[in-house]
Amino acid sequence: MEQTRDLFRFFHPLRVRWNECDAQGIVFNVNYFLYYDIGIFEWVRAMGYGLDEAPEFLTVRAEADFKGAAVFDDELDIGLRCVRLGNKSLAVEGAIFRGDDLLNVGRLTYVYVRRGTRDTAPIDSELVDRILSFEKIAPEQAR
């Protein structure tokens, strides 16, 4: 499915900084994953979690499809939404827009871990409830 702005409830604005660009003057490809990482933290914050109580995840898969190029000083919007909730993992789709222009599509899979450890655990029911009430389109549930 082609990502469009209307699929997302959550957006985080970001302005491209000079150090994120390569010798061609465009955003270096690895920085899109940085943008998604920044967005994920803000997405969790938008669901009402503070820094000391935010759920902890480990990234187990990250993909990106490049549709266009951002350049220095572009104003971007990072859209994120949970598309699948499993017992111990969740999948998030992202899209990076410059206005209505789609520049990048990402898919990130995270495994939930017990706070302060790397031990996987079932996703806390409170987090599931927050995601279900937050998202514009309900994620698939494989629980």
Image (cartoon, grey):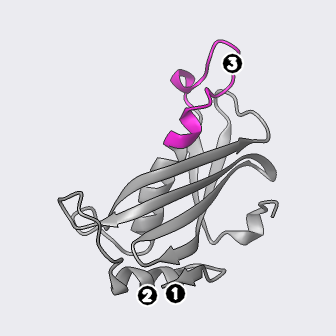
Q: What main secondary structure does the magenta stretch of the protein show?
A: loop
Three-letter amino acid code of the residue under disc 1: Ser
Q: Local crowd at mark 1 within 10 Å, few (<14), some, or many (≥20)?
A: few
User: Cα distance, mark 2 to mark 3?
Assistant: 43 Å
Residue at 64% over, 31% down: 73
Look at the image and tell me in which quarter the N terminus lies. bottom right
Dot label at residue 94: none
- Looking at the image, how many numbered discs can be counted on the residues? 3
The residue shown at (53%, 44%) is: 35
Residue located beneath label 1 in the image: 133
Query: Marks 1/2: CA distance?
Result: 6 Å
User: x, y (%) of residue 81?
Assistant: 59, 68
Viewer-nearest of discs 2 and 3: 2
The magenta region covers: 17-34
Dot 3 crowding, Cα within 10 Å, few <14, some 14–19, many 20+: few
24 magenta-colored: yes
Q: Residue at x 54, y 65 (%)?
A: 91
Mark closest to the chain's N terminus, 1 or 3: 3
**Residue type indicated by callout 3:** Gly
Residue ID for mark 3: 25
Do tag 1 and tag 2 residues touch (Cβ < 8 Å)? yes
Seen from this angle, which residue lies furthest top? 23
Q: Is residue 11 above or below residue 134?
A: above
- At 72% from the left and 44% from the top, the residue drawn is 65
Can you say whether 10 is above or below 142 in the image?
above
Mark 1 vs mark 3, CA separation in Å: 40 Å
Type of amino acid at the residue the image marks with label 2: Asp
| Residue labelled with disc 2 | 129
